[in-house]
Image (tube, rainbow, N blue to C red):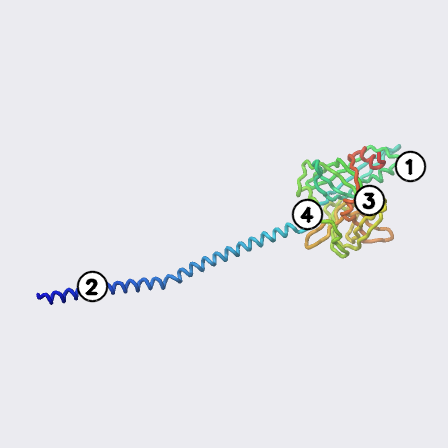
Amino acid sequence: MSDSHMRGCAWAGAGLCVGLAILIFAFAFLLRSCNSVSSPPETENTSHQTRSSGKQAVASGAKDSGTSAAKAVEEKKPGHAFGELAKTSIPMSVYWKEEDVVVDDEFASTGSTCVMGIVENGYLLVATNRHCLALDQLALADGANDSPEILDYSVHLHFPRNKTVRATHFGWMEGGVDLAYLAVPTTGLEPGRDYVVLIPEPEGDYFAIGNEVVAVGAPLGLEGTHTFGRISALRNMPDEDGGLIQLIQTDAAINPGNSGGPLFWKRNDRYVWMGINSSRVEEGGGQNLGFAIARKELKKRKMTYYEANVAGARKLIFGQ
């Protein structure tokens, strides 16, 4: 074979190699392009799922945050739920016996209370009406001119779950205001099950004529009674010291045994403690004329405490 013929074959082989290399390169480029075209939808879908998960997480977080906020608002609502009202008022009973020449005088009565809270020495403090202590009747047991010879005097509070506890201390307010306090030991008593402490809302005349109210107590010994009505009027009556006592007039039924129990104002499906049921007017054919002493009066007057026994009864009656 001549030299020129050999050189021609070499050039042909080289050209074939170059062409084959170009073809392989083009095929690889085409394959990569196809892969790059098919990849974005998968990436976009993954990104979409990520964003969706993020939105769900944000929505879930917002929902949880909203629930927490709602709970916080619920906790900050003033007053009590309706189901708590009965345990804010513990029925009370009074018994005394006074010596007489022929037959000893005896007396028993019932009333209601307002649960105020635990005092520092571990006693439960409740408010009631002064007349519920029945000391005025005891003072007149032997007539207006004779001092009674007290043989026995006791006050008991009757808690749920058949628990009866004798009061250890009591006192009444100065100025002729029909308010008093009782203290009982808390041994064996459970908050929430045996009693509910009344929530003291900020002072102020934020209630008005026409507002819905409910009176809670034990009229005629019927524990846990709720009677409903509205505020009929707001009145200021003079006390023995020349001051004024705010009374809340209501058409909610106030019967014997209701005295000393709480009066609530209904606001936004909650019940705000506003006063202490005290009396009703029947003279002259009066109907639906009940009165409660405004809660703020509890802080306005002094009170001296005595032991709730014969000696304490004598001190409250005679100041000895």
- For mark 3, give the secondary structure: loop
Amino acid type, residue under disc 4 in the picture:
Glu
Left or right: 115 as drawn, with respect to 66: right
Pointer 1 with pointer 3, Cβ within 8 A: no
Q: Which mark is residue 84?
A: 4
Of callouts 3 and 4, the N-terminal one = 4
Q: Residues within 10 Å of mark 4 (few under 14, many from 20)?
A: some
- Image quarter hosting the N terminus: bottom left
Q: CA distance from mark 2 to mark 4?
A: 97 Å
- Image quarter hosting the C terminus: top right
Q: Residue at x 82, y 32 (%)?
A: 151
- For mark 4, give the secondary structure: helix
Of callouts 2 and 4, the N-terminal one = 2
Q: CA distance from mark 3 to mark 4?
A: 28 Å
Pointer 1 with pointer 2, Cβ within 8 A: no
Q: Please state the horizontal and vertical placement of residue 315, each as a whole percent of the image.
A: 83, 35
Q: CA distance from mark 1 to mark 3?
A: 24 Å
The residue positioned farthest toward the left in the image shown: 1
